Image (cartoon, grey):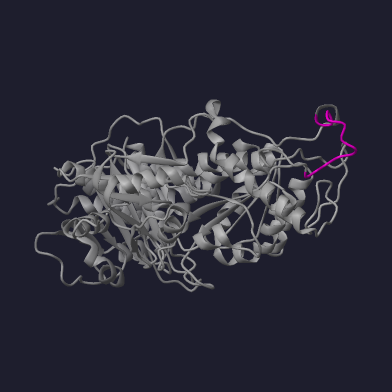
Amino acid sequence: MPVNAFTVRVGGDTLEGGIIRTGEFIAHALARCGLEIFTFRTYPAEIKGGQAMIQVRAAEHPIYSHGDEADILICFDEEAWERHRYEFNPDGVLIYDTKFEPKGVPGTATAYGLPFSDIAKTRLRNPMAKNMVILGAFAAWFGVPQEVFEQLIRDYWGRRGEKVVMSNITALHTGYEEAQKVPKRDAFRVEPRPMRDRLILSGNEAICLGAVAAGCKVFAGYPITPASDILEWMMAHLPHFGGTALQVEDEIAAIGAVLGASFAGAKAMTATSGPGFSLMTEFLGHAAMAEIPCVILDNQRAGPSTGMPTKTEQSDLYQAVYGGHGDVPRIVLAPSTVQGCFYVTVHAFNLAELCQLPVIILGDQALAHRTETIAPLDLEKIIVLDREVYDPLIHNTNGDDGYKRYKLTETGVSPMSIPGRPGTYTVEGLEHDEYGHPNWDPTNHMTMTEKRFRKLQLALHYDEYYPGFQGYRWYGPLHADVGVIAWGSTAGAVREAIDRLQQEGISVAALHISMLYPLHREVVRRFIKNMNRVLLPELNYTGQFAHLIRGETGLDVVSYAKVTGVPFKVREIMDAIRDLLREPVPF
């Protein structure tokens, strides 16, 4: 019986309103019924409207992906049905507005139709309440207590007054009553469990909380999808934690403000997407040359150029690792879960402070706007690192004559002074000597370049400063017929595929890498050598991480690249692994 384990998809034109909110309410209601939830959404980039979709997967066990097919498909209009019918479980449930008649519904499916638009417009005299009518019907057919949705309505609209609240609750009750007149003919249902100790967060919200926990005091940004809600959150909340948030005129100003704040001693970050990240590239090089800590979040979207602003991709890896003129050391991290967004952001700030380098977090649209139920964040276990600040009583023990901002050290890190305190120097983008004075001597340039890049070795030993940290995670046996390397949001679908295939008796393992650069080369080499074949799925056309791994390790992997603007399905990963197993083992 499909009890407490199903995937719901809601689709329709945004001009009707409430498509995404319908899915959000379903997700929160199921979480309040004691279930784990995992969502994915996609929506049009145009203000004028277009088809939007949100998918909610629910289960009693941990969930790693958004699900392949819709078990319950809610269509606000005919176009939604035509778009999503090919990803509909043939044994599933279709809920539709009877203003249209869906064609091609599988004979094994159950279809429930009600005049949702007419009920909202004619009976309730509130066309915008259609989604509440649908939620009432959903509650009736699948056993979600009405009280759960009622409380969600009060939580969401309570500030707008009792009239607004009661209008939506009335629509909810009307939908519930109408649905009860239709006999239930399917097996899907919710059996509420005791509420678990869980948070419901999006990836972007988790990043904001991670930044605050790490001690971020300055955020500067410019609106861009899918990172704008980070700017909005920071503007609303960072001042409550003693910080400052700025909306500036463009992305160049944003990274400039971040570097200025960090130079003055504050932990600072910005958030953007591909086009904005491109504009920040020159300042990225300046941060590396001047050795100024900073954190940059790039929520990747489909490109190039403006591309598809509301679709997901993993195609900024080359830019994150190699972007910039000259040799620019930087650290690149990639979270794969909402909870990971929180902790990776903490690690990003720590690494920036420890290594005095720019640290780039590579998120993506799917992860940024995904919501998950996660365990409460344990702030007591977080270790927060601060930069080494110059103190003449401590750092001038060798009889140095004056402050050497770029003093040659074993790790490449030299104490950084704060304006107004001891230690005066000029911050230059020019090559410089230990004192910061411009210097074009060839030997000096080689020496300083080596100094800056030594800090990448320090980053690889970050676990000595943060015990328990790993820039990778190995799932499955040490030796297998097929190994899969994953990064970013793709890792969830890979993990679920591995679990399913292992249950079928297939020998398979996975390596999830969260520190993309610098790369733990020996770990990756060992993984590849231990597997008969290695698959690397990623959401870009050129197989960017596959190319990086080949270059860093000298070993080959099979690239599985996809650029459709939507995440991998578990089934796609499983099929690719099975296809690889049919090929001869390479020598």
The image quadrant that residue 241 belongs to is: top right
Percent x, y for residue 190?
24, 41
Given residues 285 and 361, the one toward you in this image is 285
Q: Residue drawn at (89%, 39%), measured in percent from left and top?
A: 402
Q: Is residue 343 left or right of residue 567?
A: right
- In the image, residue 233 sits, relative to residue 124, either above or below, namely above
Given residues 510 and 368, the one toward you in this image is 510
- In the image, residue 313 sits, relative to residue 391, either above or below, namely below
Percent x, y for residue 496?
28, 46
Majority secondary structure in the magenta region:
loop
* Quadrant assignment for the N terminus: top left
* Quadrant assignment for the C terminus: bottom left
Q: Is residue 186 left or right of residue 424?
A: left
Q: Residue drawn at (81%, 56%), measured in percent from left and top?
A: 428
User: Is residue 151 visible to us here?
Assistant: no
Instruction: Give the residues in magenta.
Output: 395-406
- In the image, residue 186 sits, relative to residue 193, either above or below, namely below
Of all residues shown, which one is farthest toward the right?
Answer: 401
